[in-house]
Image: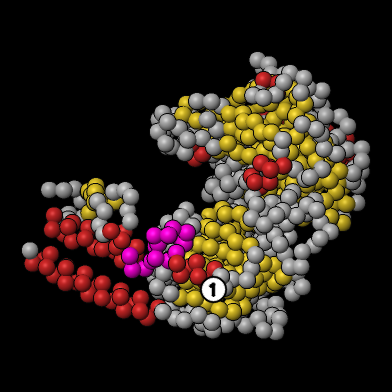
Amino acid sequence: MSSLWSCNHINYGPLFSCLNLSRVIQLDVNCWNMSHRFQTIFSFFVLAFAAVQRCVLGGESLTDPSSSAYEEYSNFVSTVPYPNQKFMGNNDEVSVFWEVDLESDRLNLVVAAAAQGWVGFGISDTGAMKGADMVIFEAATKELNDYYSMDYVRPELDDCPSDWTMTRSVVTDSFIAFEASRLIDTKDDQDIRIRDDSGVYISPTIVIAAWGDSPNLAFHGKNRAVRSALRFYQQANPIDVSRSDVVESGKSNQDILTESADESVKFTVDNFTVPLKTSHYKLKCVNIADLPGISQNETINVIGFAHSPSIDNNGVDTTGFVHHYIAMGLPGECAADVANNNPLKKVLYIWAPGQDPMLYPPKVSYPLGSNTALKGLVLEIHYSNLNLVEDVVDDTGIEIFYMKEPREFDAQVMVLGSAPGPFGIDGTPIPAGTSRHENACPESCFSMHFQNPVTIFAEGFHMHYNGVRITGQLKRDGSEIVNKASVEVWDYDQNGVRIVQQEPYQIIPGRDSYTYACYFDTDDNTTLFGQDTTQEMCVAILWYYPATNDPFLPQYCGPNFVFPKCRTNYTPIMVDKNAERVFGTHDGICPSKPEGNEPITGNPTMPDTSSASLKRLSGIFEMLLVALAISVAV
């Protein structure tokens, strides 16, 4: 007699030649007192569904020549008029084409998917469904609708009429597609404004996609693409010929770094066995001159950093065990007391899951090594082995891209937040409910650090799992708001460290102050500020140039910091459950739509072949019913 819930591990070989399976299908089936006969019938239906999905509904990839979608999709591509393209999904299941029309301030978009039922495409600060602005096409109705989502639930229709204008749709036996456009800024609080992301120093736009074969929108399962990055303003029409910093079409941050740098070098932890702890910090230090390919008297001029992932000997991607890491420059060379929280360490790069490679503006580099203040490099990795997995061996680290000659300006980094140890608020409890924790870094701190105006070319935020929203605001002369930055919907599993998407701005010493606010949502008052994964942090990071005249000044500004001039006014305040955010809200007033912005349904340019597919499906399921009757009778 089997237990109430038993699990049978069932292995099957290739089913039909059209399945094109290169490996044995493995299904973990939860059974409830299943007899052998019922298990056989159940398994038959599972495999039959896989056959229908693979053979009748089309292939899983738009780029696989053996896929039934490949030929029709290839023919469709010739009809797309837009210059930019990106595949999304593990197997290139979705293809996106786009162009920004600067004269009409509109985004023109084509989305195609190897699916039969529906496809969705969205913009998301988190890189996932939570906090996303989405547009979804359903083949059954041939309608395009505007959605948004505040959590990992079924998305909500916008309260205002759709901001998208659909110009055509395509439904075939093997793939579906739509072409549409929307305003860059719809003025709708349930939409995300599309920002100019063409500059090499500006973070690309994070996009997501999902698709399915059900007639209408349904749970996508694994049919999704998260944290893809593209630049909407690549090859904008007309091209701004006055800008020399525009990223070429199709290039990622990694591509730009690889092409721009003279050399690159990796610094990793090398075969470190992840401890059986929920939280563990690993420190490793190296002298710049001891890195491979760098001589004792050499200065390297860093232009960017990228994460160097690790795959252990068992084929396990160890990224999931790395909570975050910080790469810091060390005054002098490595010493035995590297772990003493030396406040003169300089933060160079912070990585957490989901973080893209960082590159500096074309005229900026960070000097390290000989003839500089920073001759050592410290890597502080925070491991989080929440499930206490054994024998995980990690080689995580960073790849440093550098030039032989310095650029025009040197860069530096300033951290605004709670410093570790006694110079912060570690151990302070966070009240139950939704609360805002605001810190104001005063004018006196910037005056101490900077003698002249500096340019902020990157701004990043960091919190842990209880964080729900984070904002930063630069004020001038006590009242004028010079710059506002935010991550409206925070999700640590996707964000980690989020570099906000914005143009550079200046800080003027003696006139400017910076206020940053972290919003947390907790069930009780047992969550503390601290360095552990289960605790909380509230950090803003400013990358700037030119570097300060005194590279040995501590670069923190936060609550209880040792220098009074860089001590913030820390204020926790209880707020509404929505964390005072605007995105996802509706005040009852919809912005006016430009003439001709009404959604278009139907398919004006392409034939509809969905009925043939439905007939084929009907025949398949009739065969399945006959097979079921035969199995029961046996």
Is residue 632 shown left or right of residue 334?
A: left
Q: Amino acid at mark 1?
A: Phe
Q: Which residues are magenta?
A: 55-70
Residue drawn at x 53%, y 63% is 95
Q: Which quadrant holds residue 184?
A: bottom right
Placement of 304 over or under 228, stated as above or below: above
Q: Position of residue 591 (x, y in %)?
A: 70, 77
Residue drawn at x 79%, y 45% is 362
* Label 1 packing within 10 angstroms: few (<14), some (14-19), many (20+): many
Q: Position of residue 46 (x, y in %)?
A: 26, 60
Placement of 528 over or under 624, stated as above or below: above
Q: Position of residue 58 (x, y in %)?
A: 38, 66
Q: Quadrant of the C terminus?
A: bottom left
Residue 65 part of the magenta-drawn span: yes
Please tell me whether the stretch drawn in magenta is mainly helix, strand or loop. loop
> Of 32 and 125, which appears nearest the observer?
125
Placement of 478 over or under 68, stated as above or below: above
Placement of 376 over or under 152, stated as above or below: above
Q: Residue furthest top?
A: 336
| Residue at mark 1 | 178
Q: Is residue 242 visible from the viewing direction of this image?
A: yes
Residue drawn at x 85%, y 48% is 506
Q: Residue furthest left?
A: 634
Residue drawn at x 56%, y 49% is 494
Is residue 228 shown left or right of residue 362?
A: left
Q: Which quadrant holds residue 296?
A: top right
Number of marks in the image?
A: 1
Q: Helix or strand or loop: what does disc 1 sit on?
A: strand
Is residue 490 shown left or right of residue 186?
A: left
Residue 428 part of the magenta-drawn span: no
